[in-house]
Amino acid sequence: MDPVTPEDFAALLTPEGRALLDSLHDYDPAQELAVATRLRREHPAALVSAALGQARLRQRAVAKFGAEDAFRMYFTPGGGEMATRASVAEYRAGRLAALGVRSVADLCCGIGGDALALARLGIRVLAVDRDPLTVAVARANAEALGLADLIEVREADVTGVDTAGHDAVFIDPARRGGRGRVFDPESYSPPLSWAVAAARSAPYAAIKIAPGIPHEAVPADAEAEWISDQGDVKEAVLWFGTEPGSVRATLLPGPRALRTAEPLPDPEAGPVGRYLYEPDGAVIRAHLVAEVAEQLGGRLIDPTIAYITADELRATPYATAYEITDVLPFGLKKLKALLRERGVGVLTVKKRGSAIEPEELRKKVKPQGPHSATVILTRVDGAPSMLIGAPVSGP
């Protein structure tokens, strides 16, 4: 995608630009060359290029923001990818509103996804970013969604912004560099240490961080929360002014929250029972597998694997249950023969602690037949194993 300048973007906000972009609501990217050729007969080439790029970004953003908002909003190529999913931003904004927060300094605001969620709850937002194009896009989004009266967008280096007078600070440091994702929190922009110091200066604060952050990097005076949406872990958040030292796993939609101030020790490992539970990714990242195992009356199948097993079925929102019919040592020939014998043509492959890739396994066993099954590649008491079964239906 060609780079977009602030001038190119400004052209999209003119009546001609808006009308052109609206006409591309349902356009097929596969027909882009023909569409571009036709539109350039009536519009400047730079405007057509910017509109087509924006139309592609809007289509991609539907999964994150929903069609109603995505087709009214504006995006930058990187900004749409890095923006918080709307459901997660709404949840986080709800937590701040429940604390009585009425004004937030949103530092590193990006295209404004979090500012929009806050403003929709009536919270006033100072949204700050240092990139001119990003600032223009965030300002346009506030206008497009009718929230400009509650959102002030400012172009500035966040490290020089005075946040005094705001009830809360929200910081979303950049976690990508020229070579891709940044894993060292001190290589965030701005660094995590700066973000923590800024957070401590406000009555309440939240810092969005990568979900893979080591637990030892979490400050003692912060609450650490891992958030998943529909089973996918989206982010971790460091909260200040809430529950210092506590750990929380939050599952969306819901929300359903599992939290503790004193995590339990790892449960014992034992033989595979009739049921296997796969904890949600947020539970695993938050190191709360032991809490779920206790609720289920379960045990681990291996001291190093986050699968819980139990002999009785218990409902839990924090894990997916499977009924296990076979526990076998790992072996492709044995698995292929078993699947053929049972007429399994639809095979779901899950793995934890195995080097085999699911697609590689499917190609080798070539499932055929009318039935379905789930094979879980893992370790049981240290030994490579295959667990055969099916998801438990019902709530």
Image (spheres, rainbow, N blue to C red):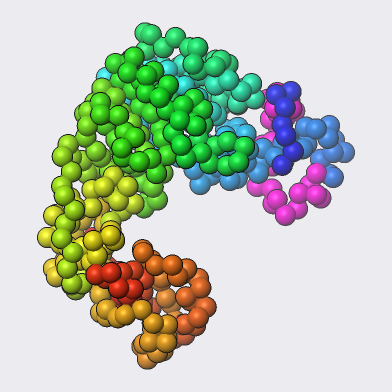
Residue 145 vs 290, above or below: the answer is above
- Magenta part of the chain: 8-36
Residue 394 figure quarter: bottom left
Residue 87 seen in this snapshot: no
Residue 358 vs 88, above or below: the answer is below
Q: In front: 107, or 301?
A: 301
Report the label total: 0
Is most of the magenta stretch helix, strand or loop?
A: helix
Q: Horizontally, is 328 left or right of 186 in the view?
A: left
Residue at left 42%, top 82%?
332
Classify the position of the C terminus by image quarter: bottom left
Classify the position of the N terminus by image quarter: top right
Residue at left 70%, top 24%?
6
Q: Horizontally, is 154 left or right of 123 in the view?
A: right
Q: Position of residue 325 (x, y in %)?
A: 25, 79
Q: Residue furthest right?
A: 41
Q: Position of residue 387 (x, y in %)?
A: 30, 75
Residue at left 53%, top 44%?
62
Q: In front: 198, or 393?
A: 198
Q: In front: 355, or 375?
A: 355
